[in-house]
Image (spheres, helix red, strand yellow):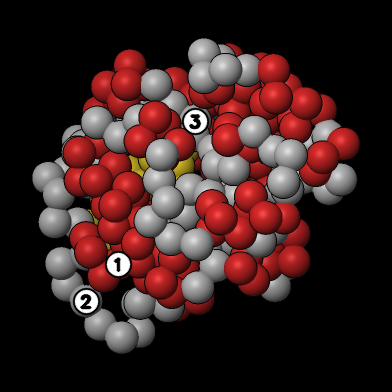
Amino acid sequence: MITYNEIIKCHSCDLRQSFAEKYRNSYKYHSFTFYYEPKDVKKSKYIIVMQNPGLPKNWKNSEEYQALFRIKGYGFISTSRKYLIQWLRKENMNFCKKFFAVLRQYGLIQFDDLDEYLENNFLSDFIVTDLVKCRAGTEEIDSENIKICSSRYLFNEIEHYGINKLVFAFSSRTWEFLYSKFIVEQNNQDKKVSNAHGKLFPSKIANTYFIPLAHFSQRQFNNYLRESYFDYLKEGLKEYKKISPHNKSLQRMAYSHR
């Protein structure tokens, strides 16, 4: 079981030290994120893997920064979850509206009000994690950071928690790592997220499937013509419905939203 206590102590690569030098007055809980409890693993049906937790603008003056100063371990995960939801509902709501609407259309989730779903049910349906756990800008992450962190944490998360789940892998670096470790039939073309975006990939883990997706930053999102980002996703979800271990319940849920 991967826990945030392990990550607090991690100094396997230089990202933690880099963060400490940049934010000298930061408390240890500022330097990484972690979003789930052991109890969440059993009830969740899906996993979202993002690339890395960045920093809010004006980080040291942010509400999140101050909130992390006040905790002493207890409450760290609930605080991380709170600001993850806030980030989704504010900076990424344009993406979230369309992404979760598609998942509802194909019966993966149920909701009437998206805000209410994100607040109350999202983190029951999904485990959310990162390729690289430490807070760092994208430009600060190199192949060595990814190799060390993802091999130590993400690999074990997917191997142990991914059984019977659908994994959404966001960003090219995230997909390249997961593709190399878990996909059975490989080719050079599908290693690139630009080619694999939205496709369904069975994995080496029993009843576990992956759908790679381009990063959902507004800049990347705008690179796709009209609704093609989600059109490709729909194709992957159609395939998942046919072979999913949750197939019967997915069919009932999809029918109820027609």
Residue 143, horizontal then vertical, whole percent: 43, 74
**As shown in the figure, which amino acid type bears the numbered disc 2?**
Gln
Q: Residues within 10 Å of mark 2 (few under 14, many from 20)?
A: few
* Along the viewing direction, whichever of 202 and 249 lies nearer the viewer: 202
Residue 116, horizontal then vertical, whole percent: 66, 17
Sequence-wise, which precedes: disc 1 or disc 2? Answer: 1
The residue at which mark 2 appears reads as: 186
The residue at which mark 1 appears reads as: 179
Q: Label 2 near label 1: C-beta < 8 Å?
A: yes
As displayed, is residue 141 above or below residue 216?
below
Q: Residues within 10 Å of mark 1 (few under 14, many from 20)?
A: many
* Along the viewing direction, whichever of 254 and 196 lies nearer the viewer: 196
The single residue placed furthest to the bottom in the displayed view is 188
C-alpha gap between disc 1 and disc 2: 8 Å
| Residue 21 in view of the camera | yes
The residue at which mark 3 appears reads as: 35
As displayed, is residue 97 above or below residue 232?
above
- Name the residue at 70% across, 72% down: 223
- Name the residue at 79% across, 37% down: 90
Q: Secondary structure at mark 1?
A: helix
Asked whether, in this view, residue 136 is left or right of residue 152, the answer is right
| Dot in front, 1 or 2 | 1
Residue 151, horizontal then vertical, whole percent: 29, 58
* Along the viewing direction, whichever of 13 and 223 lies nearer the viewer: 13
Q: Secondary structure at mark 3?
A: loop
- Name the residue at 47% across, 54% down: 132
| Dot in front, 1 or 3 | 3
**As shown in the figure, which amino acid type bears the numbered disc 3?**
Tyr
The circle drawn on residue 44 is: none
Asked whether, in this view, residue 66 is left or right of residue 162, the answer is right
Q: In which quadrant of the rendered image does the N terminus lie?
A: top left
